[in-house]
Image: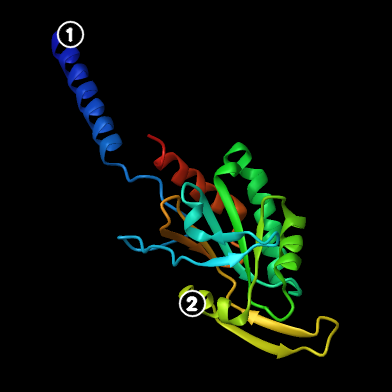
Amino acid sequence: MDKKLLWMGVGILIVLGTAATLSLAFQSPPSFRGTLYGQPFPPAADFSLAKADGSQFRLSDQRGKIVLLFFGYTSCPDVCPTTLAEMKLLMNELGNAAQNVQVVFVSVDPDRDTPQRIQAYAGNFYPSFLGLSGSLEELEPIWENYSIARETVESGSAFGVIINHTARLFLIDAQGQMRLSYAYQTPVKDIAHDIQLLLKQDQP
């Protein structure tokens, strides 16, 4: 009788061990919290704009880093300063991993945003943030490639002309692919979670 109970116990342990092993083998990988682009991931449309110091920025030169791309303008009363403030919190949240991330803020208001003005604005939030602008002719193809809608509205307030625009944050991975996008005011911790997942995936 004792031997029978012993073998029953061993059998139960084997079954439990096998179940645990199978569970680990087949569990789904950690999921992203942003809106994931379908595979194969589309390449991010390349573009080039002059920086405040006169040197040329080219998106494709950012390979090896995760790029967070956002479109807005320096006279924006709410969405743009809120998003850039959240990007500052994100960089703080990432700690040392922030060196692998580049925030790029592209203007939708070429009439008021010079390269110098938008860089000074973005840099006030975080030193490494890049602010970029250009002529209407330079910016329109970029807006089109990223499906950025914009509408100019006379506000009658101290802000003057208000530009309603697409307020989506785009995450471009280190290989230059469109990987994720985020709605306005997505929690910073969700974006940080996705970036940390991507950085782990890129480790050899």
Q: What residue type is labelled 2?
A: Ser
Q: In which quarter of the image is residue 17?
A: top left
The dot on residue 44 is: none
Q: Distance between the residues labelled 2 and 1?
A: 73 Å
- Residue at 72% x, 52% y: name it: 126
Q: In this view, does 99 lie above or below 164?
A: above
The dot on residue 2 is: 1
Q: In which quarter of the image is residue 100?
A: top right
Q: What element carries label 2?
A: loop
Q: Earlier in the sequence, mark 2 or mark 1?
A: 1
From the image, state whether disc 2 or disc 1 is nearer to you.
Answer: 2
Location of the C terminus by quadrant is top left
- Residue at 68% x, 82% y: name it: 163
- Residue at 65% x, 82% y: name it: 164
Pinpoint residue 131: horizontal percent, then vertical percent: 67, 63
Q: Residue furthest front?
A: 54
The dot on residue 147 is: 2
Dot 1 alpha-carbon crowd within 10 angstroms: few under 14, some 14 to 19, many 20 or more: few
Pinpoint residue 187: horizontal percent, then vertical percent: 60, 57
Which coloring applies here?
Answer: rainbow
Pinpoint residue 142: horizontal percent, then vertical percent: 52, 74
Q: What residue type is labelled 1?
A: Asp
Q: Residue furthest right?
A: 158
Q: Is mark 1 on a helix, strand or loop?
A: helix
Q: Is residue 136 above or below residue 5?
A: below
Q: Is residue 198 above or below residue 22?
A: below
- Residue at 24% x, 35% y: name it: 22
Side (left or right) of 142 relative to 9: right
